[in-house]
Image (tube, coloured by chain):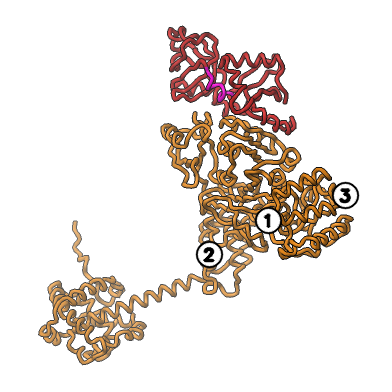
Chain colours: A orange, B red
Amino acid sequence: MGRKRQLDRVPSGPGRKSRRQKDPEFESAKDKKAEKKAKRPKLDGLKKKKKGKPKAAPPPVALDSEGSTDESDLVGVAVYPLPDDFGDDEEVSDTTPQVVDGAQGDASDEKNEGSDDEEDGDEESDDGDEGGDQGMESYDEGDSSDEEELLPIEKAAKKGRKKEEEDNRLAEEELQTNIAATETLVLPSGQEVEKDAHIASDLTLVQQRIRDVQFVLADFKARKQEGKGRSDYVQQLRRDLCTYYSYNEFLMEKLMDLFPQDITDVLEANEVPRPMTIRANTLKTRRRDLAQALISRGVNLDPIGKWSKVGLVVYDSQVPVGATPEYLAGHYMLQGGSSFLPVMALAPQEKERVLDMCAAPGGKSSYIAALMKNSGSLFANDANADRAKAIVSNLHRMGVHNSVVSAYDARTFPKIMHGFDRVLLDAPCSGTGVIAKDPAVKTSKDEKDIQRCSHLQKELILAAIDCCNANSPTGGYVVYSTCSIMVEENEWVIDYALKMRSVRLVPTGLPFGNEGFVNFKQHRFHPAMKMTRRFYPHTHNLDGFFVAKLQKFSNKMPGEEQKPKPDKETNGQAKGDKSTDKAADKGQKRKNADSKEPNNTNKKRKFDPPQTPKQQGGKKNKTDTPQGEKSSPKLKGILKKSPQNAASGGKPSPTTKKRGKPSPTTKKRGKPSPTTKKRGKPSPNMKKKGKPAKKG
Amino acid sequence: MRPLTEEETKTFFEKLSKYIGDSIALLLDRQDGAYCFRLHKERVYYISEELMKKAGNIAGENLLSFGTCFGKFTRKDRKFMLHVTALDYLAPYAKYKVWLKPSAEQQFLYGHNVVKSGLGRITEGTSDHQGVIVYSMNDMPLGFGLAAKSTEACRHADPMMVVLHHQADIGEYIRNENALV
């Protein structure tokens, strides 16, 4: 049952099939031919022979006529590039169609004629073409007289090549026009948007639209729709992203502000969980031994990276990683990779007094104890008593002997104890960095939540700083970290701390991570904010995190000239000041001590709740309190008396290094209400009290 | 937080000496400072003296734990129950030890008693109702228990007979976390 038809027969005739475009095989074949020809020597005798050969065989005529109608457009365009070839067509009357005809003729020559002819033709044309090519090359300067020497087949070949180039160029242009036609994405109108909001839209369409809009935004001027501005596109993109990834508008807006370029990367990374990581407990085992033991149990793991000596990442496991005998024996702790970072930044030393203010469930506390090798003392606190029990359990399991666990509201901790060498504050946050772990964050967070978190964090960081001892021989460091990527919870809180307390930012010592923002939207933060570190799921494959390391350089409050208690303490403190503060200040402080008034000493206590910058900003100008009136002559006295102050260009003492100046003499206030908007322009140099501009 | 009363100290030390014998003195007088036992909310904590002073700053109701918890006193009878959290300190001074085969490990970690077939090794001279520390074959401490039979009796015992009564094991960190605090 074999076929009787010829499969290779090219359809000829007036029908549709005969007009079908032929396969573009010419180039490679012709190139090869051209190469061959280039190699072979010129054969003049052969050339002359072929000259007489009729150029176009009759059968292609029909084709030509049809072809010409099809390609009438091309005909007009066809001819420019090779004037030499143009000149080749002297033999034929009508030049332009002949180009086409020639090409077709050549094609039909190759295909229609018998194999013998083809072979002969090929061979001859090879030789001829070769000579022709050589001829062409040598005649490239436009010597038309020598073109007559080219064999007809060579000319046909040339024309075929030209036609090919034409075809390719036109095909490209077509493609471009096709692209241009689809480029102008039409944004849905207002009605369509409303409709979309009500009915569940097809996710594939939404995804396609996301890609389209991003494509348009990539080259906005060229690709935009008339009458639509950039904001329209951005809004549409935001809506689509919210639909596709199930976020609420607020959070999506925040993310788009933070990541204008890689928003899709971020969102995709938030859909996928981060790899499971564990930390080897150096109090009980070594990472190598632990890895061996776990591998023998059937856990597939690897060291986490160069940046940690105790971390292991678990790819998969035959046994539950949280229930192996090694886990129960306290050889390791299940902990996210980014949770190693604040403790690495804190770098607690042996025999120090360290405080972990929000310690539950105890992963970081146990790491701190491991680094301290169970010496010194570690205070682990958490406001939630139930969660604090987990700290107890974990610390016991990990073999930590030097810990004290408490359940206080961390904001009140400074009143309980202070004078710690190092303090770690892993503040409660909105959790926008760990969306992969808790997808509920996508829809549940809004403006108020962020503000509430931010407010709490500000209170906590001040408490943390107050717990720390600036005069500690080995420390005086506070590390602030959150698992959030919002600027309101990170840089803003640090900026607040810089203004309110005598602290400065220091490098975290972490080997990787993005720098914190110094400028973001309307915020202008302290330039040292670059030393903080941000970590993202899509760039580092860690949970979103923020780490900042502060060093406390003075136990005094900024702007505070007196000590809380009179006489003894002031003398004691004055001596203490000598050891820590610069010489330039000694004079100032003693003078302050002299000129101070007894009332003032009592009024300014160390643990006053911090005042908001706005309130302070308001109070700066007002001197309605009696203390305010008293303070200015005092300060003027300082400026007059101290020559060093003048010499240093009017710069104040290092204790008042931070920008912004909370007046020490403002009234005591209760806790600032949660609705106090703290967002204002931080314009630290706006000093209206006649004090010199402070440089933080 | 308060020191233990006489009676409490007596009960407590008795229990301890079941497992570690006379090494209690070693626990109290250590190279790196003096350690002491303190009672807080019916629980006995083992802590160095300096840390104890610092922990004194924290109010009773907010203080959850300090140092290492060894166990707790029952409310009614004032009997002392030793917790697995004391294992770290008991293990180095243990006089009588029992090693379990891997098959019996899991059972013990679930809180069951150990039968003869799961027994790997046992220290010579273990008497009946002796407090023993339980190890895995890798010398990893798993918990402690009471020997149900003396070493001699164990040799001749039936494979299904209980040789070790379970007292505390490290599996409690997952099973029974709340009871530890």
How far apart are the alpha carbons under marks 1 and 3? 31 Å
Q: Say what secondary structure mark 1 lies in.
A: helix
Q: What residue is pinned by disc 2?
A: A214
Q: Label 3 near label 1: C-beta < 8 Å?
A: no
**What amino acid is found at the position of numbered circle 1 in the picture?**
Asp
Relative image position of residue B181 (x, y in whole percent): 65, 28
Q: What residue is pinned by disc 3?
A: A599
**Mark whose residue sits in front, 1 or 2:** 1
Residue A269 visible in this rendered orientation of the protein: no
| Same-subunit check for callouts 3 and 2 | yes
User: In the image, which residues are magenta?
Assistant: B86-94
- Residue B68, relative to residue A360: is it above or below? above
Upstream in sequence: badge 1 or badge 2? 2
How far apart are the alpha carbons under marks 3 and 2? 64 Å
Chain for numbered disc 1:
A
Going by the image, does A18 lie left or right of B34?
Answer: left
Q: What residue is pinned by disc 1?
A: A495
Upstream in sequence: badge 1 or badge 3? 1
- Residue B79, relative to residue A683: is it above or below? above
- Residue A547, relative to residue B164: is it above or below? below
Relative image position of residue A671 (x, y in whole percent): 79, 48
